[in-house]
Image (cartoon, rainbow, N blue to C red):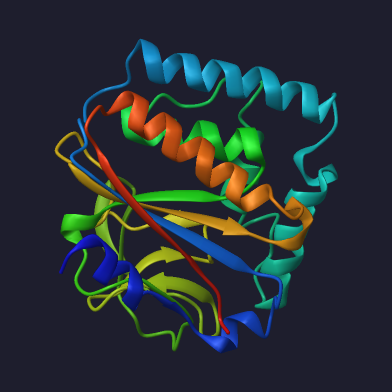
Amino acid sequence: MDAQDWLDRAFIDPAVTELRPDYTAVIIVAEGLRPGPSDDASDALLAAAEAQALKALAGGAPADLAPVAAWRHAYQAFGAKPKRTRPSVEALLRRIDAGLPRVDRLTDVYNAMSVRHLLPIGGEDLDTYSGTARLVRAAGDEPFDTVSDREPVIDHPEPGEVVWRDDLGVTCRAWNWRQCVRTRITHATTRALFILDGLAELGADGLHAARRDLAEHVSALNPGARLAWRQVSGD
């Protein structure tokens, strides 16, 4: 399945958009990537994002920012407690004072764009997917492979929890809270997908501004990479 065919099959269950009718996702597929450890270029992107976030926070809490508060409300709509299960963008912003993690050159880029544009962004290895991505409300018996006390375990989402999944199980719990181990980006990833989560509080062009910025920097750090994208909603 080529990138555009894969994107065309991605979907959002209407049961999710009933919770947040303003929700829209942009999914980007990037091929021909050059993975590896964090480097000077990815570090510079994170440093610039940290400085911008500190200015936006102005000494306040991440939840004081409207786009972050909106995600807290979205989590509450399916029963999650956002003080315990934090939207990914809030979790990153809470680490600004100590410095964002330097993970690898692909993860660093999408984390920087998440903080810069104040929206959740996830990145995963497309070659580890089985079938396409879909956002659904969980039955509660879907497998989710994770790590607990440094040991691999199979967990399960709560019934009704909003999750991204493929044919094999949950790839990200609680919309954008925690990614599974199976599909995570590694130093061997050459084909990746990036999911950008948008709510109305981003503004009319906020989601696509983040898409353009992410695509520009992925292309700059990976000369020759091929990118395709699609906007997905529950309509």
77 left or right of 160?
Answer: right
* Residue 202 left/right relative to 48: right
* Nearer-the-camera pick, 136 or 204: 204
- In the rendered image, the quadrant that contains the C terminus is bottom right
Whether residue 84 sits left or right of residue 36 in the image: it is right
Q: Residue at x 69, y 65 (%)?
A: 81
Q: Position of residue 46 (x, y in %)?
A: 51, 22
Q: Residue drawn 50% across and 79% down?
A: 158
How many dots with numbers? 0
| Among the 4 quarters of the image, the one containing residue 170 | bottom left
Q: Which residue is pictured at 53% across the width and 65% down the height?
A: 175
Which residue is the extreme one toward the top? 40
> In the image, what residue occupies the spot 43% across and 78% down?
11
Q: Quadrant of the N terminus?
A: bottom left
Quarter of the view holding residue 179: bottom left
Relative to 28, does residue 47 appear above or below in the rendering? above
Who is closer to the viewer here, 99 or 36? Answer: 36
